[in-house]
Amino acid sequence: SHDCLSTQFGGEPMLYTRFSIARQTDGDNSHVEMKLSADDEEGGEIGRPEHLHASMPPPQRSGKNLCFLIIAALLLLLIGFLIGYLSYRGRMQKASRCLDGSGKCEMTPTTSYLADDDETEEEEVPGPPVFYWPQLRDLLSNKLSASHLEDSLRQRANQYSFEAGQSGDEGTASYIHDQFTSFLLDEVWNDEHYIKLQVKGSSNNKVSILEDGKEEILESPDAYVAYSKSGPVAGKPVYVNYGLKSDFQKLQKLDVPLNGTIIIFRAGKITLAEKVANAKEAGAVGALMYLDPSDYKNTDALVPFGHAHLGTGDPFTPGFPSFNHTQFPPVESSGLPRIAVQTISSQAVAKLFRKMDGEQCLPEWKGGVIGCKVMLSNTSKMTVKLSVNNVVVDRKILNIFGAIKGFEEPDRYVVIGAQRDSWGPGAAKAGVGTAMLLELARVISDIVKYDGYKPRRSIIFASWSAGEYGAVGATEWLEGYSATLHAKAFTYINLDAAVLGFNHMKISASPLLYTLLEKAIKGVKDPTKVSGSLYDRVGADWVKTVVPLGLDNAAFPFLAYAGIPVVSFGFCNKDEEYPFLGTTQDTVENLKMNDKLYALMRAAAEVAGQIALRLTHDHELFLDFERYDEELLAFQEKFLPYDRDVRALGLTLKWLFFARGDFRRATDALRRDITNSDRENRIVRRALNDRIMKVEYDFLSPYLSPKEVPFRHIFFGKGSHTLQSLLENLQLLTTSRDSVDVNVLKEQLALATWTIKGAANALVGDIWDTDNEF
């Protein structure tokens, strides 16, 4: 055996050597994998004598004995062949893993994500050396340090502004770059973008009351709303609760005129940009938002910063990356409000309410401001004047990246990101996430460099700038590299605002990550209790409490624009908002009023770290592609009551339902392919993982222009193509049938049906396995 093996690798060439060349799927054919067949070892004639004694007479044997001897020899030969083959196959597998010169020839533990971590026996499959998952999970937990998190957060303690593209933001960017370098990450780099931001002008914006020819200044705060229309506007004030569509509909039913008015609403429920869009749709010329004391405690004098762009990214290069503005003609996002917007304090709103002499607020609209009024009386001549002095400026921003490269598939990566900039101190909004990002980079790099873990896939750590203006840094990166990222990035983990309280958890995620997230929170201790895990806190029905991603979450463009699965989570207080977000009081000292702040940050970092490491550990990507079948079924059940109304219009829902059935069969087929596949074959494994990671992307409607409709996801996007928009249109068939445009409904049904059908075809795999029949 030793002679045979030495012959294979260094001695004389053997006869009848067979080999196969496997070209890697990324186009690099420099790697040749040689597999020697078993009969290469057994079939060669080693030490063959040169002279045979032909004159020697053959022994005399009976036919029966000769037959017996032949059968016995054949059996012995077969047994020897099997023993030699199995022994040789094991040696060759081990030897092939030593050819890189590392000398580390370990077997790789792996497991399917469908199995329970603690009960299933780990299976040994060839590949790069990695730890068993329980070992890796414990190593992460032991290395994460609350004191390191505290030190990083303290960087923001004595600074009061980190505005995008300014000195505070650039200084933090340089610090993060240096930290990534000191952690010995494989790659560290900057990504520059030249963007347009709207900032406050030379003087503060101003809100005034005009009455009897006199102007009384109500408030002139330091804070402003980016992307507001500049200039003065005036109108009668009308209070519209949270500014929800349902709030405006209530006023319209009461015949309250809204054209030419200044709308007042309180913060919460939806983003400021969505409130402003609702006000513009109702005919308002301006909008004012304040922090109501019933929702935001101890904020009577505080005025928050915000932005009014109904979208993400640079609104002056919609759909294009902001590498250089001179490359593109002047264009503006359709999400810009084109009405004047300003934030004011609840104290100023109380004074305004005292001036209003109209109808009292609806009981459910009353907040913490005393004397709530909806409008002025018919005889009142009072108006509110809003003067906005914002200006548009050009800024260079930097996104900072660090990467740990995978050993098997370095061109497949999970991204962990956090916003770096903030209008004020931004301790909760940006400081917590940045501290967690640095700690995870330090710990995971340490596990790889010093403990021997070899991730199969890469991990990218990203620090975003201009997040305050609508995830500008993250969106511009996605727009700049969309052709690459949708095929290579398979998960985004958002760390922003991860600790806003302590007694509750807020979770937003793609359904593909529900199973992995649940396993992660089961493995992380609850820092607020003596015993128990975070899973004990959220309970078995936690999926029902998942919050849809909003436009103000940096994970939103990853999911809705790029089709990359995301997870965003954090601690908060139940039924109570963190009062200082986006204000000058978002300081480290105020944040420390949260009980066990640094322990909570460490727990959140551990959840994020477990998700990232598990996605780089297992052979099979830990994305639960079968979960979307449940999501489709849930929508089908919501659509079903309107089947008769749809048929009355000459349309049908059956093709949509058939498409869902096709998707279910496609997931079953992929699960069978995974079960029956050779998990030792890297090419097969990669092909199966590529089918899994494309599931999210395939729910981006391919029939829409990314420039005109950037958020094309039919589950989580924005626009008439979404399943939620289709459901709302179907509901109108029973409440306001005449308002339903049949052609629009027909197009919605077609877009939804063929997007789902396309996702099913992509999941099946090869083109010859697809079918355009329902």
Image (tube, rainbow, N blue to C red):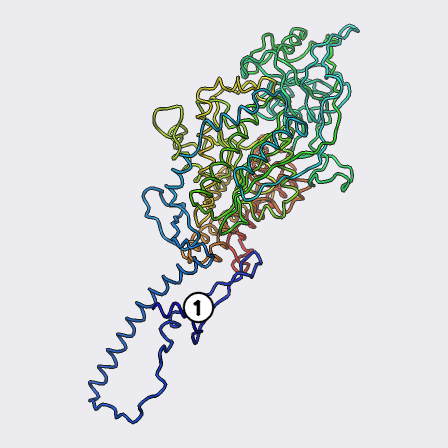
> Which residue occupies the foreground of this view, 759 or 397?
397
Is 249 displayed left or right of 405 in the figure? right
Residue corresponding to mark 1? 10
Tell me where residue 424 sits by quadrant: top right
**Badge 1 local density, few (<14 within 10 Å), some, or many (20+)?**
few
Tell me where residue 190 sits by quadrant: top right
- Total labels: the figure holds 1
> Which residue occupies the foreground of this view, 661 or 517?
517
The answer to whether residue 643 is seen in the rendering is: no
Is 404 displayed left or right of 287 in the figure? left
Residue at the (42%, 50%) spot, across then down: 129
Residue 420 placement (x, y as % from top left): 59, 30
Secondary structure, mark 1, is: loop
Residue at the (20%, 89%) spot, across then down: 61
Tell me where residue 718 sits by quadrant: top right
Residue 308 placement (x, y as % from top left): 67, 26
Image quadrant containing the N terminus: bottom left
Position of 82 relative to 102 (above/below): below
The amino acid type, in three-letter code, at marker 1 is Gly
Is 389 displayed left or right of 658 in the figure? right
Position of 176 relative to 375 (above/below): below
Residue 2 placement (x, y as % from top left): 35, 67
> Which residue occupies the foreground of this view, 445 or 569?
445
**Residue found at the far right of this picture:** 213
The answer to whether residue 173 is seen in the rendering is: yes
Position of 698 relative to 247 (above/below): below
Residue at the (41%, 57%) spot, across then down: 676
Residue 143 placement (x, y as % from top left): 42, 34
